[in-house]
Amino acid sequence: MAAGSGLNCFSNGTTNISLEGDAYIDGKFIKLTKKPEELKVAENIGRATYHKPFLLQEKATGKLADFTTHFTFIIDSGHGDGLVFFLAPNGSLVNIAIGGGGKLGLPVEDLPGGMSRTQYPFVAVEFDIFQNTQPSIQDPPNDHVAIDINSLKSNITTTWNGGIDKAKLNSAWISYNSSSKNLSVAFTSFLNGTNGTQVEIIRYLSYMVDLKQYLPDWVIVGFSAATGNDIAVHRIVSWNFTSTALVDETTMNNTQVFPPPSPSANPKSGTSSIRLPIGLGVGGCIILAGGLALVWFMFIFRKRKAVGESGENPVVNCLIDDEFEKGTGPRKFSYRLDAAQANKVSNENLE
């Protein structure tokens, strides 16, 4: 693929998204889980990753990459169970046998005595819509966003109202600063405003973590979701990811040995929120330079057009831009949703 080439996105024949489990592309979205009538068994697990690995760390220097990602998603119908954005070792696969329900497709295995272990390391941001109280998870009572490191006992959690019952279109921004070791998350949430109106707010979550203590040099990035007895359809509507370019001086090994989990991360963290008019919440996709601070996310967010301002025909476009430099993996790619299509997606009865 030449740098800067344009592609139709999330089409059934796309080759730059790797799908596992129940995940599939229906021509409009990545569907990580299926509708109830499509299921043969109760548990429903799907994973979608970018088809090329991402160089997180230079082996020679130990330098970590900065990265940013923005995606929009819809979780429709019942509260089961949620989705995650994750980083995991290159070559790792979803484990259907253990990843269902509250595991959200992550490789956490239950052990006797309420213990658990991870089959390979991961760092994930979860959007959880079901309270799982088993010892290996211990969710809070409400829908929530959390950061997970090698465990489903989240390192930090904050409440979230994603408008699941109304299939609201949600946005999330995730940024990692390799200098400060700050993993930052911003995400939409919905509150009831005055006079019966609904207000969209932006909430924040951050956690200090040195990713090189937990992940190998080469990682994959993507999404996973799962359901149990309660079913929900988890859709990825648009996605972009940008990172700083690093150099790998060795030949990439596609079958890496997964190291054992590291000790707990440094628990420095924070949460906050900002109110925005609901019309600003579902504009077009944003392409961001690697390593930008989370405040830059929100500056751009405030600049986005209100829904319905675009006069263009609704179309989902894919822009692959400058990411295929030899040996560095995906530096920038974007699955773009324009404002008119976003408005349609958030209000129509999705099939």
Image (spheres, rainbow, N blue to C red):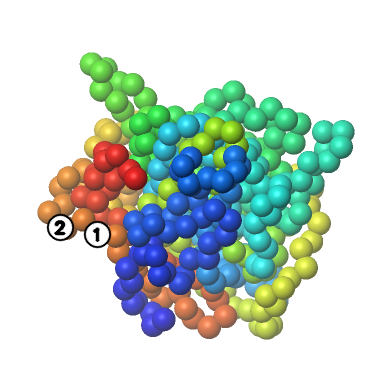
- As drawn, 132 above or below 100: above
Identity of the residue drawn at 30% across and 64% down: 317
Residue 61 vs residue 106, the one in the foreground: 106
Whether residue 202 is visible here, answered yes or no, is no
Q: Position of residue 226 (x, y in %)?
A: 57, 44
Residue 31 in view, yes or no:
yes
Mark 2–mark 1 CB contact (< 8 Å): yes
Q: Quadrant of residue 257?
A: bottom right
Residue at image mark 2: 312
Q: Amino acid at mark 1?
A: Val
Badge 1 marks a residue whose secondary structure is loop
The quadrant holding residue 60 is: bottom right
The residue pinned by badge 1 equals 315
Rendered residue at 76%/63% (across/down): 258
Furthest residue toward top: 195
Q: Is residue 221 left or right of residue 316?
A: right
Position of 310 with respect to 167 (left or right) is left
x, y percentage for residue 222?
53, 57
Give left or right: position of 307 versus 51: left
| Residue for point 29% across, 26% down | 198
